[in-house]
Structures are given as structure tokens and as C-alpha cells.
Amino acid sequence: MTNFHDFGLTDAITRALTEEKYLTPTPIQAQTIPTVMSGRDVIGIAQTGTGKTAAFALPILHHLAANPRPRLRKSCRVLVISPTRELSGQILDNFHIYGRHLRISAALTIGGVPMGKQVRSLADGVDILVATPGRLLDLVKGNALRLGEVECLVLDEADRMLDMGFIHDIRKIVTKLPANRQTLMFSATMPRAIAELAAQMLRDPVKVAVTPTATTVERVDQRLIRVDRAAKPGVLVDVLRGEAIDRALVFTRTKHGADKVVRGLVRAGIAAEAIHGNKSQGQRERVLAAFRKGEVRTLVATDIAARGIDVDGVSHVVNFDLPDVPETYVHRIGRTARAGAEGIAISLCDGDELALVRDIEKLIRLSIPVTDRRAHPRRSESPGVNRPRSQPPKHRQSRRGNGRRGRQPRHQAKEARPADTRGGIASVGFLRRQASDGADQARHVVGSINHSEGS
Ligand code: AMP
């Protein structure tokens, strides 16, 4: 499909897409939209930035428009569950944008804000409910919401739900849903626990997969600056002053680190805000709005907080700390270079992080050009130096315990590693083949996933 008109979506939707200047469906949209419209369950392997929200939102809106039904009190026809408040808000915004010419009601129920308004918004029933898992269960337990009328369930960022410990909640929610619903599950990666969940929840699903990672990595201008650990804050200031920045997303390992970086930048006269899990919902929304409008050009975030942020026009991603998991690097730099735009990713690397750089280079099959800003550089330590670009670097066979920090890897690192590798650069050939072969090929791939309800 090269045109949104080819899908047979109702005119009210294609009109909204034209207004939004969506001309061509993205690969995940081309694969998913017809499948969802045919009523099949879908398991989609796709990250944020691939257009996956429209991939499920458009056919869902079409279904609601084509099959109008009176609303039932405390009920919803479509339930979308996402792991973070930000992502949930963005999904709802997208439903509003694409459905702006339809008479469809949608509500948001997320944690961190009082429940009363959300209870009232559900009283007369809604067509679409977008929710985070914890709050959703609270509303069900409090008899503010019944799930027996759900025709379509969407689970977005399923792997992140696993990382954040929501899988138990999801299982509970699923037991309250009708068995004859349609289910769409999206995940950036496919760890075993998610594949098992899919086998229990989905009925003969069609598997669709896209890997933005290769194209993203190729499009981003990546640089590495070797620094002494203590000099990182100063080098960050230099980087932000020295670049023509539209919007910069700076990643730190911890929430505390994010706050510290912001304080340093503000002291140096650079307006910056932090976004992470310790911030209230109101604070996060205010900061994100300021970043979107360009009032604050530097946002400092942890990986979890950044996951749901959907902001176009991020010109720079700066890794103040390098991530433990190499795939996370690819996710981070994918925040720039969105929708075909080019972006710049700059990583500050201290001596403790060299092994992480090697793992990243191995994954992306590129050596990242290095600038040395250390006080006393020792040439042999520099990753990438003297290697021509685009050649796979040489690596150790084993990565563990070699040059890593003395800490335990985080939970996320442990859970995500095997499957992330499958969904990452290493598997581009397989996934591309699958994407081009279309749905039938994809169906074959999931032939072994059986439906068995009642988790
Ligand atoms: P998502 O992966 O759903 O977070 O989408 C990433 C970004 O791409 C969002 O800003 C969307 O508005 C935008 N987008 C999605 N689909 C298209 C399309 N077909 N053409 C242009 N932009 C799109």
C-alpha cells in the first residue's frame, strides 16, 4: 500500500490524515492496517517512531465509525493499555487527531492524578479508553469500569510493561475481557515472557515486524567524546553551546543524575529541565509541553521516562551516561532522525564505559568516530580510533565482568538482552525479508503460537 486511500478507511479518517500531511503509510502501517481491518489479531514488533500508533488507531477508528453502537455505562469498546502516563496521553492525542471528524468519545485513565474525574468520565461509557495498568485495575475494582463490552484490546510496548512489572496486572485485566475480542499487541522486542503472554492472549495472530534500527542508525550522525568522568558536566555544556540545537534530549542513567545534570546546565546558563519517574504528572506534562514548543531546548531524561516521549524535531541526542544495554543506545539515538529527518547523537564516554561502547559498536556494526577530550589521553584505550568507519570493530567474545562497572546490571538489562538482540541490528536481514514477504509469510512465523485464554 503506498497510499492511505488504498486501505478503504472511512473518508473522515483519510481527511484527517491529509490535514496531518501523512502521505505514505509507514511499513508497520502498511502491514498492520489491512490485517486489523480484516478482524485478525496482530502481534507487532515495532518501536516508538515507526508510526505504530496510527497502525492500530486508524483501523480501530474505522471499525468504530463503521459499526456505531450506543454507549453503555461504565464501559468501553476499545481498551488500549500502555506502560507510561506520557505514552498513554500521546496515544489518546493521536486518537483525537485521526478521529477529529468522527463522533467518537475517548478517555484517559492514568495513575498519579486524582481518580474522581476519571470515574466521572467513564460514567456514561466511552468508545475508546487509554489506560495504564495499575489505574485501570483500581477503576475496575472500584466498580467504576466494566470490561465485559471490550471488542478490541491493544497492548502497547508490552516488553516495557514486563520491565516495569506490569505483567501480573495485565494477566488480571485479561481475565475480565470477553474471549471473542480482537487483540493487538505491540512490543519493541520479544522476550520469552512476552511471547508466552502473546500465546495465551492472542488468537492465531498475524505477526508484523519492522526494524527501524538499521535505518535509524545509518541516518544519525554519531560521535563519541572520550572524557574523564569528572569532566562530563563541563564537556556537556561545551557540546550544547557548540552545536546548533533545535531540541536536545540528554540521557542519564539515574533520576538523581538527571537532576544533577540539569542543575549544572542551569548554573552554566543553559535552560534545561529533567523528566523522570519522580516528577509528578503535572510537572512532566508542563516540561514536555515546554520542550515541544521549543521554550526549553534541553530535556534531561532517564530511559524509562523518555520511552513514551513522542516529540518531533529532536536535533540532538546526548548520552551523558552510556546505557548498560546496547539496544538501549539504538532506542535513544532513534529519538532523533525521526520521520526521515537527520539527527546527531553525541556520547560522552569515560574509562569505565569503554566496554559498553564496544558492545554498542558490535551491535550497530559501525565504529563511532571519536574525539578525545581527556586531560591525559592514552591512545590504546580509545574505542574506534584508527578504525575506518563502517567496519565491524573487533570484539572480545565475552562481555561480562570485563571493564563493566562494579554494579549488578539492572533488571531491565537482564530481561531485555536475549530478545533485544533478536530484534536489533543483528536480525535486520530476517526482519526485512519478513516485512517484504507480507502477511502470509508473517502468519506462518506465528503458526506455533496457539490461543489459550484465561491467564
Ligand atoms: P509513533 O511510532 O506512533 O510514535 O509515530 C512517530 C511519529 O511519526 C509521530 O509523530 C507520528 O505523528 C508520525 N507519523 C506516523 N505515521 C506517519 C505517516 N504515515 N506519515 C508521516 N508521519 C507519521
Image (spheres, rainbow, N blue to C red):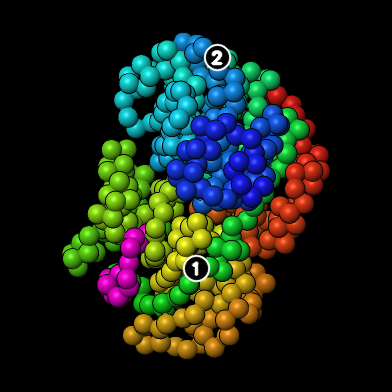
Which residues are drawn in magenta? Answer: 234-249
Q: Is mark 2 within 8 Å of ligand 1?
A: no
> Residue at 37% across / 87% down in the picture?
376
Q: Position of residue 185 (x, y in %)?
A: 62, 37
> What amino acid is labelled 1 in the image?
Val
Q: Position of residue 271 (x, y in %)?
A: 22, 60
Q: How many marks?
A: 2
- With respect to residue 331, does 22 lie above or below? above
Q: In which quarter of the image is the C terminus?
A: top right
Q: Position of residue 213 (x, y in %)?
A: 58, 60
- With respect to residue 311, does 193 lie above or below? above
21 vs 203, left or right, is left
Which label sits on residue 220?
Answer: 1
380 vs 107, left or right, is right
Quarter occupied by residue 401: bottom right
Residue 153 visible in the shown view: yes
Mark 2 lies on residue: 69
Q: Could you say which is closer to the camera, residue 230 or residue 112?
A: 112
